[in-house]
Image (spheres, coloured by chain):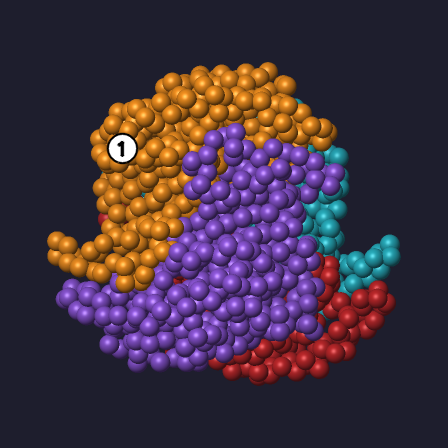
Chain colours: A red, B cyan, C orange, D purple
Amino acid sequence: MAGNSFGILFRITTFGESHGPAIGVVIDGVPPNLALSEADIQPELDRRKPGQSKITTQRKETDKAEILSGVFEGKTTGAPVAIVIRNEDVRSQDYENIKNVFRPGHADFTYLAKYGIRDYRGGGRSSGRETACRVAAGAIAKKILAKQKIRIIVYTLAVGDIYAKKIDYSAIEQNMVRTADAAVAEKMIAKIEEVRKNGDSIGGILQCEIKGIPAGLGDPSFDKLNARLAQALMSIATVKGIEFGEGFGAANMLGSQHNDPFVLKGGKAGVKTNHAGGILGGISTGEDINIRLALKPPSSIAQKQQTLNEDLEIVETQVKGRHDPCLCPRVVPVAEAMIALTLVDCLMIQNSLVP
Amino acid sequence: MAGNSFGILFRITTFGESHGPAIGVVIDGVPPNLALSEADIQPELDRRKPGQSKITTQRKETDKAEILSGVFEGKTTGAPVAIVIRNEDVRSQDYENIKNVFRPGHADFTYLAKYGIRDYRGGGRSSGRETACRVAAGAIAKKILAKQKIRIIVYTLAVGDIYAKKIDYSAIEQNMVRTADAAVAEKMIAKIEEVRKNGDSIGGILQCEIKGIPAGLGDPSFDKLNARLAQALMSIATVKGIEFGEGFGAANMLGSQHNDPFVLKGGKAGVKTNHAGGILGGISTGEDINIRLALKPPSSIAQKQQTLNEDLEIVETQVKGRHDPCLCPRVVPVAEAMIALTLVDCLMIQNSLVP
Amino acid sequence: MAGNSFGILFRITTFGESHGPAIGVVIDGVPPNLALSEADIQPELDRRKPGQSKITTQRKETDKAEILSGVFEGKTTGAPVAIVIRNEDVRSQDYENIKNVFRPGHADFTYLAKYGIRDYRGGGRSSGRETACRVAAGAIAKKILAKQKIRIIVYTLAVGDIYAKKIDYSAIEQNMVRTADAAVAEKMIAKIEEVRKNGDSIGGILQCEIKGIPAGLGDPSFDKLNARLAQALMSIATVKGIEFGEGFGAANMLGSQHNDPFVLKGGKAGVKTNHAGGILGGISTGEDINIRLALKPPSSIAQKQQTLNEDLEIVETQVKGRHDPCLCPRVVPVAEAMIALTLVDCLMIQNSLVP
Amino acid sequence: MAGNSFGILFRITTFGESHGPAIGVVIDGVPPNLALSEADIQPELDRRKPGQSKITTQRKETDKAEILSGVFEGKTTGAPVAIVIRNEDVRSQDYENIKNVFRPGHADFTYLAKYGIRDYRGGGRSSGRETACRVAAGAIAKKILAKQKIRIIVYTLAVGDIYAKKIDYSAIEQNMVRTADAAVAEKMIAKIEEVRKNGDSIGGILQCEIKGIPAGLGDPSFDKLNARLAQALMSIATVKGIEFGEGFGAANMLGSQHNDPFVLKGGKAGVKTNHAGGILGGISTGEDINIRLALKPPSSIAQKQQTLNEDLEIVETQVKGRHDPCLCPRVVPVAEAMIALTLVDCLMIQNSLVP
């Protein structure tokens, strides 16, 4: 309960630092008899890995997953699945000059305040590299959801103030910024390149859509589906805001506008509109769940910045090379993973109810 | 783990339905030797209770707390503190005519989908009435935080599109909408009265500020302070969006703008700006934590609405009397409570680290 | 997580002190649509309540259960079920003279060491009275198990060195010591009366048998069925030892004697012998689970004892009236409850596995 | 929560199968600034490893621990510590002939019943090999306890009916059966050799003593120190019984005999006798905690046994080579580890109480 586990029945525990020997994840509660191999995991890791395009960090990591346990003759056994990813492109010397500096926007200061010690190499435990473990575990969760015909679609809705206008899911994996509007993708990429050349970075917005979810997932009170998804997604370091359905827009709506009347859809109860975003009282309605995430601009920028060091001296710092100018494309698979992990856990909890 | 508990070391479990005999909460993990009586809890409940002003529901509940355990001779003993609030103004007959109707925007449909049964009286377990339990428990958490000089301030920032402009904390409890701008309060109240007369409801935005928090609270990865607060606050049924620091504004900022440089403040490290909202890498910096919550318009409105009933027949429904036209003023103490509960838990976890 | 909750999916939280206003329990995770009323709970409480026979404490408590939540029109709704039992025969003045004394064998000293404060009235939170809450919750668990044809039988195997010789389940509830051997019951009762007259108390052994359990319950590694049952049963204050199957007898057996060969039983795999006691590798085999519990003699005795008080002065103490000379008969329903609570939780976890 | 984690604040998660690529453990909640390297862990693993003497299995495993995370420049950072141990002497072919056989006394049948699939190689997840992970994690726990002057001593009290008579802690690590009586050690070893030659195995009893523990550890109700230790120790597959203090002996004692009067000891309150075994009301008294564990004879024996296979055919089975004839010496470090893990968790929970 020191924060490195997520989930109740389908529960992951991640470990590892950016520049240590390896990172990894243990997934406990994987249902047995699920076909599983590294080939299921690697494509997801590849979508998150650094160096995948000109608009991501150029750190070189093959992010090769090795399954250490829980699979026998190609199937899960019910035992915990451990996955390890060795760190490769570990240039710790890049961090020597900032080892006692509190980089603006980073967790250097807060980790030191919390623990009285910190691994300064690439952010150590606070590095975004930890999210590779989530993606690896999420790949398993997605396999389970696929059997239930539940689909999770995440894409870049905006980079800075450049918004996708047309939503075409098939476009998402066809452009390096992972937006759903092929026409706008080029503008987003150009914007990202521009800020990168200025030694700067930029934020953006992700749109998440969950389709095919059955009604009834999520638990009352504190474990509402939206509450659990909020924790899951807000635990991605770069996320600063989250909205369900109309989100902040709902603050300026009337009840008569926002309420979604129930109507017949294919002989079943559905909603005419979906302002609520697929969740009522914390429980899924069966309609699409819609979420938006605000991503801050990455803190690592090439520009010189003034800040303090551990001796409380004013220093100038400059974060060297190899950083993401915009995190949108790489957070897409991470958000998918966190959603998938949450949904599998909710499904299993729901299954448990029949005594 | 069926969703009715919150917290790890300071852990509450709530129970009760809107129109059952009682609601209540058990708080396990209350540190011993804390002076505690009903007099500590009642004022907080009074801030949340119905009928407190003309712009809240006129349901009459004294919401009188009774402490059943955990206190001896005026002090906590380390044993669980149970608090029970009897339901009084229980007009279940008001709900007879909607007993098999899926009220738009309510959890009627989802609870039935989940459990195959539902207590239709006033929303049953999904009623906002459950939040009284959170407020009661939060009163204890606040006493603990007060000893550490940690303050939580929540106020109505907007009702619909009417925003507070001046922020004066002393004004908050002086106006019935609990905004920080006395001048704007009257406009907000007039707006609420107007929508109520139209048989409608309206949303709003709450601003939350946490002051005096030490650096180092929150845990890495999944239990980041913002992630835990996001779950805590999103578990309030009416909340549809949450932002930390710049929130969605960060999506259109550059790293060079958003990064908060560290500077000396009274001999200690602080930040020059606070775009991050007091949290870096999921751990508190010691600066103020700033959060905004989007509240949807209440689903219960007096206007006639078309919807379905359990037999999937199209019906017209009208929710009778006694509902809140805007939830902002009553959610203020609930949000404070959820923040307080989260912070005490984080404090206790941090204390545990010294072996 | 301050120790007053038990279970993962079917999770109870108990509260209350011996001489406070009330004791109670919240059960979260109760499956919906289970017929439930106080009439299901009261008979179990009556089996545990004080004053039920001449060999139990004469404290008068009707132990009347009131269900506060989670039941609607006679059925559970999936919401938490809260049950409260008001304390009635509260003679706190009986404890005035021992308020600062460390009674031998009681938790007076350890609670003070832990919390720096203690509720001295009747042991406060450490009182055996807390177990009434377990029995109330266990009554619900038993209803769930009954649907699965799972039966739990607990009886007094020994009082001191007087052992039941013949095992006849139908005899158990027919004698006040709850042993399975009607002929031996009188000797046990006589023994208990004798020690009581001497102002003393005596220990005993309970035998627990679980019948009709499906194969496959329990989880690997730390949540083995026997490990969870061990925690469950050892959490009853009076239990000092626990054995599964051959228990300590296994220490002096050979593998060739202890191993239970698998054989066909009604067309299914079963075991020829059952030395393992129905559990292999922490998971149920489907055979009867056999457990024995050692109960210490109750600490409250009428004899004068020398001990210390809080000022570390040597004092003579004498625990006044109304105590159990032997806890066997009253722990029988408590042990049944703890087993039932554990099994329902394991069943629900097992159900969750099918994704 | 699928059973492979243990602990609340100091929480371990183990993974791996006997004949998979590796086994390992993630320890979350390790306090920062603790000096730690593989050199702290290896000696403990060596005490547990196979092939350490003529009376243990001759499987060859170096059990070399590799720390993958959580340590920076020789100190823990507060991040999770992951330890991996590669499997080396993996002769899976030894298990080909028993791949569909339900070996008597093993978990073959129950794992298949639970999961519908099983890794038959060496017991897979149910193998005692998993305990190496506990020992590795326990080594860290012991370092933390050593700072608090808390010592855990475990030794073989009996092999079959041969009991240690003299208790000399310094003898324990000097004889291969790890008993505290050097004179009796030879008899025990001779007995073990004898049963091994007969293709059989034998059980035994371990004695556990915890010294230097502060008063106040453990939590009321369900998380009593003895209850948590009972789960911890009963989760070792070979343990069939557990006693605290007088254990089953208490069943035949009078209260006047069993009660431990409080007396002055070095100016502090202590107990004259220690029949309770160092725990009252589930909380440590500060006196030595005494526990006895009954170990069954190992199920793997060389003798031919009749049993069933998965097709429910009667078959003869013979477990090939390399097994432990008596588990006492190798379970000693495992029991120490489980006790250490429990105590560190309790210490951290106790620390959290001061708000």
Q: Position of residue A107 (x, y in %)?
A: 68, 64
Q: Nearer the viewer, residue C27 or D189?
A: D189
Going 15% across and 54% down the picture, which residue do you hit?
A: C265
Going 81% across and 59% down the picture, which residue do you hit?
A: B269
Q: Position of residue B333 (x, y in %)?
A: 61, 36
Going 52% across and 68% down the picture, which residue do you hit?
A: D175
Q: Above or below — where is B213 with respect to A41?
A: above
Badge 1 is on which residue? Answer: C180
Q: Position of residue C282 (x, y in %)?
A: 36, 56
Q: Place residue C355 in its image quadrant.
A: bottom left
Q: Place residue A234 in its image quadrant.
A: bottom right
Disc 1 sits on a residue from what chain? C
Q: Nearer the viewer, residue B134 or C47?
A: C47
Going 61% across and 23% down the picture, which residue do you hit?
A: C317
Q: Nearer the viewer, residue A177 or B159?
A: A177
Q: Nearer the viewer, residue B102 or C255?
A: C255
Q: Is residue B158 left or right of residue C21?
A: right
Q: Is residue A197 visible?
A: no
Query: The disc labelled 1 sits on which kind of residue?
Result: Ala
